[in-house]
Image (cartoon, rainbow, N blue to C red):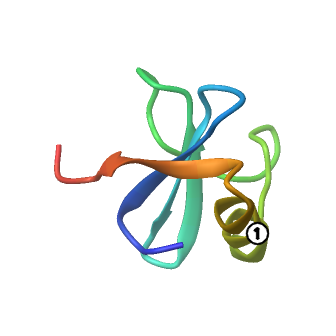
Amino acid sequence: MMPGVIYGSINNDRQWILHNGIIKTRVPGDIWRDAGWPQPTMKESDIDYYIATGEMKEARSNGE
């Protein structure tokens, strides 16, 4: 997982980003929120695993 890169699941529209060492999540059109209750939680190692298995992909660069 690279900082500032948005990753998304191939199975749903939830997105994840590593920003200043904090994992944040959102659904498109919503604001970024820290991962954790009540938002879904994932560790960086979890996201790295899903990227490696092809279950998550780079959605786009954060340079919107």
Please name the residue shown 54% across and 50% down the image: 57
Specify whether 46 is left or right of 29: right
Percent position (x, y) of residue 31? 44, 33
| Foreground pick, 1 / 39 | 1
Specify whether 25 is left or right of 52: left
| Foreground pick, 27 / 2 | 2
How many numbered discs?
1
Percent position (x, y) of residue 13? 59, 26
Q: Is residue 21 above or below residue 6?
A: below
Query: Residue lying furthest left in this view?
Result: 64
| Foreground pick, 38 / 23 | 23
Specify whether 37 is left or right of 23: right
Specify whether 59 is left or right of 40: left
Q: Is residue 14 above or below residue 19?
A: above
The residue that label 1 is drawn on is 49
Question: Label 1: how many residues lie within 10 Å, few (<14), some (14-19) or many (20+)?
Answer: some
Q: Amino acid at mark 1?
A: Tyr
Image quarter (top left, top right, bottom left or bottom right) of the N terminus:
bottom right
Instruction: Name which quarter of the figure residue 12 lies in.
Output: top right
Q: Is residue 16 above or below residue 9?
A: below
| Foreground pick, 6 / 25 | 6
Q: Which SS class for mark 1? A: helix
Please name the residue shown 62% across and 33% down the image: 14
Please name the residue shown 41% across and 20% down the image: 29
Percent position (x, y) of residue 51? 64, 62
Percent position (x, y) of residue 50? 73, 59
Query: Residue lying furthest top in this view?
Result: 29
Please name the residue shown 17% across and 43% down the image: 64
Instruction: Name which quarter of the figure residue 52 lies in.
Output: bottom right
